Every structure is written in C-alpha cells, then in structure tokens.
Amino acid sequence: MTDDPFVSHRRLLFTVAYEMLGVAADAEDALQETWLRWAGVDQAQVRDPRAYLVRIVTRQALNRLRTQARRREQYVGEWLPEPLLTAPDVAEDVELAESVSIAMLTVLETLGPTERAVFVLREVFDLPYGEIAEAVGKPAATVRQIARRSREHVAARRPRMQVSRAEQQAVVERFRVALRTGRVQELMDVLAPDVVLIADGGGIAAAARVPIHGADLVAKLLSGLSRYPAEMGTAPVVLNGAPALRIEADGELVAAVSLVVEDGRITRIYAMRNPHKLERLDEPAELSR
C-alpha cells in the first residue's frame, strides 16, 4: 500500500487519459506531466487529491488532443485507437468495458477535444459538473450543455451491443474458424449483410485505406488470408474488455482484430495493423473507474 495519491489513483488517471486520447503512449505521457505537476505542488494544501489529479490529467490530455488533431490530418488511411490487452476485471465492469471498447473510442474520435473530455468525465466517471468545469476551463452551465450535446452525439453513433459475453465469444470463435478455412460461405454466415471493415495500417503495414462495406466484399477480402504465403495463426484474446483476435504470421504479431456483434452476426470489424499500435499486447493494461 502507498499513501501517495498519485500512485493510488494511477489506474484511474491512465484510464481517463486513454479514453480521451485513444493511444496508450500519449496517455502515459499525460500521466508523466501530471506527476511532475503533482510533485511540484504543496500537497498538504490539496483538499481533494483525486479531483485535483483528474483535473490535471484532463488538461494534459486536452493539450495532446489538439496536437493529435494536426497529426491525424497527415495520417495515411484510416485511424483506429490503439488496442489494449485487458484483464478479466475490466470485462466484468460492463460500463468500463463499453467505454474503452474500440467501437466506443472510434465514436469518441468524432467529438471535439472539449466535448470528448466532458463526455468521458461525466458519462464514464460520473464527475460533478463543477469539477468538470474546472478541468476543461468552462462555466458549469456551459459544461451541462456540452454534456447533453455530446451524449446525444454519441448515442446516435454508438454500436448497440446488447449481447452477452458468451454470445460474443461464440461469434468470435465462429469468425476465427471461418478465417482459418478461408471459405467464403462460412464467412458470409457470420457477417451481417451491412458489415463494415475498417483497417489501420498507418502507411506501414498493408491495409485497406478506406472502409470496406458489405458482406460480399468483406468475405472475399478475408478469404484470401488463408492463402497468405506465411503460416497464419489466430488466437482468441480479450482486447479493451471484449473478446477479440490476435493474428500472427510465422509467429509474429501482424494484427489485432476487434469485432462488434449484433443479433448473432458481426457488424463491424476493426483491424489494427499499424505495428506501433501492437506493441502493448503482451501485458494487460491497468484500467479502472
């Protein structure tokens, strides 16, 4: 145990930063800046260390979000959040698992920096409007309006993932088997007619640079993986609180695949191929609310 509030709340602070930024390395940088500021204040004068630290990490994440926006304009192809290997306790917290899912983080990318911060702090961490106002530098009344607009914006775009973990695992396993056989019909059977595949290669790894729509096109593309010259391997894994797949070629990790399941079929496929986003899949990330 430790009496240092920064250490005690580190998991929470990392989760706030990651949900705002979608990139673990950027979240860690925000944490480092937060620690430096925490180490430089008279901590005995801080009445609520948790609120203070959340406020600082939010400001650091906001600064990085604005920098990210400029980098994203130059990004090659589609941009997806960095996947994280997660422990069972994340999946057991249904609200936390949904908030850190690749699908939700992708939706959050459609919000502006302030809107994203307000949504995360209010809807995920249930912070009072007054604390959020201090974190984002806006009046509380304005924050309430931003929260309402952000909530409506996300609700209109978020996947309707009302499926049990067991059902999702079963669909992911069917998909894994179909990938291995490469049979188009088996893939078609597990894909929704309007499925969308989004891949992120970052201009480094081969990947479709625009979303692919429809079961026919997606199945034909995926069926080709079985004819890949390297020895392909797929393994179930839990990413961002949900069943997913790890894909290897000749024993080397080449992709992490996250799926959205609705009514027993896959409606979204998020394929992360950028090698820089596959570097943290050996050790579970520490997330909490």
Image (cartoon, rainbow, N blue to C red):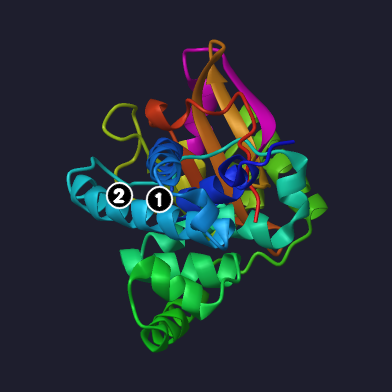
Residue 64 is labelled as: 2
Q: Position of residue 228 (x, y in %)?
A: 48, 19
Q: Name the secondary structure under disc 1.
A: helix
Q: Quadrant of the N terminus?
A: top right
Q: Is residue 157 visible?
A: no
The amino acid marked with disc number 2 is: Arg
Q: Name the secondary structure under disc 2.
A: helix
Quadrant of res 226: top right
The answer to whether residue 280 is above or below residue 118 is: above
Earlier-in-chain disc, 2 versus 1: 1
**Front residue of 246 and 212:** 246
**Front residue of 233 and 74:** 74
Q: Which residues are magenta?
A: 222-238
Relative side of 74 to 124, left or right? left
Q: Position of residue 92 (x, y in %)?
A: 78, 52
Residue 21 is labelled as: 1
Q: Is residue 75 visible?
A: yes
Residue at 60% in and 29% down:
246
The answer to whether residue 203 is above or below residue 51 is: above
- Dot 2 and dot 1 residues touching (CB under 8 Å): yes
